Image (cartoon, grey):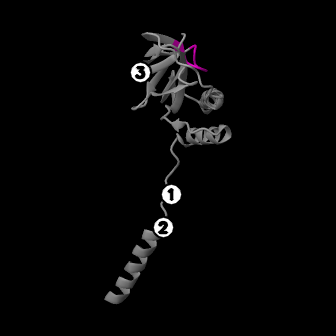
Amino acid sequence: MKKIISVVLSMVLFISINCTAFAADSPETPYRNILYNVNRTYGLNLEYESVDTSKVSLEEYEQFITSVAIQQKKLCQLILQRELYSQKEINISVEPRASKTITKDTWQYGDAFSISATYDVNGVAISNPRNISVNEKKWPIVRYTPNAGSPTTNIIDSGRTLSVKYYGTYTAIDVSVSNVQLYAEFYYDS
């Protein structure tokens, strides 16, 4: 009798261990699916941020994510064009070095954000970028929280242009999305 109970109990435990537990979908699953589909459609890697489903409908969320994705796709294409721009060698004249602090609107989000940067100019060459920050023009309607480690800078156009990229979380009223890129360029003659 003990052997039969042991065998039956072993079978029950074996079957219960191998059964997959199906959890009910959370209310946010349709929102995640929208983001997944938009990322796939536009070839992006936007990241999901929690949504208050009582305040934001699926339609509002889809409209928001699609508009951000369109802006991000355009921005990525513009940046790619700039990176592929033919590099011409230039003669760097020996002129006194000047330090500049400039604020420029971001590409594609210029109505909402600007970026400030300080850098040195020697003739037509930029060097030593520093003190870089994002400025919010429409706070508290839209906000941007940079990721740790942002921004990244690059000196392009044979040293004549400083490019600045931020990655972070973009929030408009009740909706947020992460891995959103902000970009601006600073020129030696700005």
Residue 128: assigned label: 3
Image position, residue 106 (x, y; %): 55, 18
| Residue 150 included in the magenta stretch of the image | no
Q: Secondary structure at mark 2?
A: loop
**Closer to us: 8 or 52:** 52
Image position, residue 1 (x, y; %): 34, 90
Residue 111 position by quadrant: top right
Query: Alpha-carbon distance for marks 2 and 1?
Result: 9 Å
Mark 2 neighbour class, 10 Å CA radius: few under 14, some 14 to 19, many 20 or more: few
Instruction: Look at mark 2 in the image and give the residue it sits on.
Output: 19
Query: Alpha-carbon distance for marks 3 and 1?
Result: 55 Å
| Segment tinted magenta in the rendering | 104-111
Residue 29 position by quadrant: top right
Query: Alpha-carbon distance for marks 2 and 3?
Result: 60 Å
Residue 119 position by quadrant: top left
Position of 21 compared to 83: left or right? left
Q: Label 2 sits on what residue type? A: Cys
Q: Are marks 2 and 3 in contact (CB under 8 Å)?
A: no
Q: At x 57% / y 15%, what residue is drawn?
A: 110
Residue 22: assigned label: 1
Q: Secondary structure at mark 1?
A: loop
Q: Label 3 sits on what residue type? A: Asn
Mark 1 neighbour class, 10 Å CA radius: few under 14, some 14 to 19, many 20 or more: few
Residue 14 seen anywhere in this rendered image of the structure: yes
